Image (tube, grey):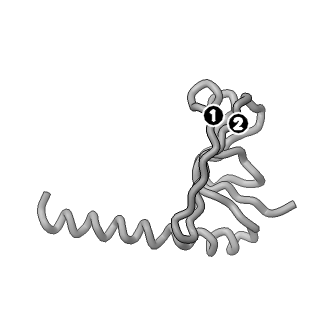
Amino acid sequence: MSRRSKLILVVIVVLLLVLTQLQPVFLRSIGAVDGSFGLRLVSHKCAGIRLSGEWIAVRLAPADWQATLGYFSIRYNIPNEATEREFCLGQDIWFGE
């Protein structure tokens, strides 16, 4: 890999890390209370891909895992039982109760 290619790769990684820290800004700009990125049941809206509960139950293992990287919240949450609700692969958006 050339030096220029390595530099471009580093710049892209740094930009992606910086952009992740804008997650709260994005959520507030659309009037949301909170949200997380990853794979989980749709709370209110999904900025990403919606997947059926049946599709998830057949293909992915149940688990509940959550982490943060600065202001960036990541969550993988698939319940033990199949559900008829949809899952969000991307940014789940919660507007409050």
User: Tag 2's secondary structure?
Assistant: loop
Q: Is residue 6 left or right of residue 49?
A: left
Looking at the picture, tell me which residue is in the foreground, 3 or 76.
76
- Residue at 76% over, 37% down: 85
Q: Between disc 2 and disc 1, whose residue precedes?
A: 1
Give the residue at mark 1.
Answer: 62
Marks 2 and 1: CB-CB under 8 Å?
Answer: yes
Question: Mark 1 belongs to which amino acid?
Answer: Pro
- Residue at 35% over, 65% down: 13
Q: Is residue 42 above or below residue 55?
A: below
Q: Where is residue 1 in the image (x, y as percent from the top left)?
A: 14, 57
Quarter of the figure that contains the C terminus: bottom right
Give the residue at mark 2.
Answer: 79
Q: Where is residue 56 in the image (x, y as percent from the top left)?
A: 63, 32
Looking at the picture, tell me which residue is in the foreground, 30 or 80.
80
Q: Is residue 53 above or below residue 90?
A: above
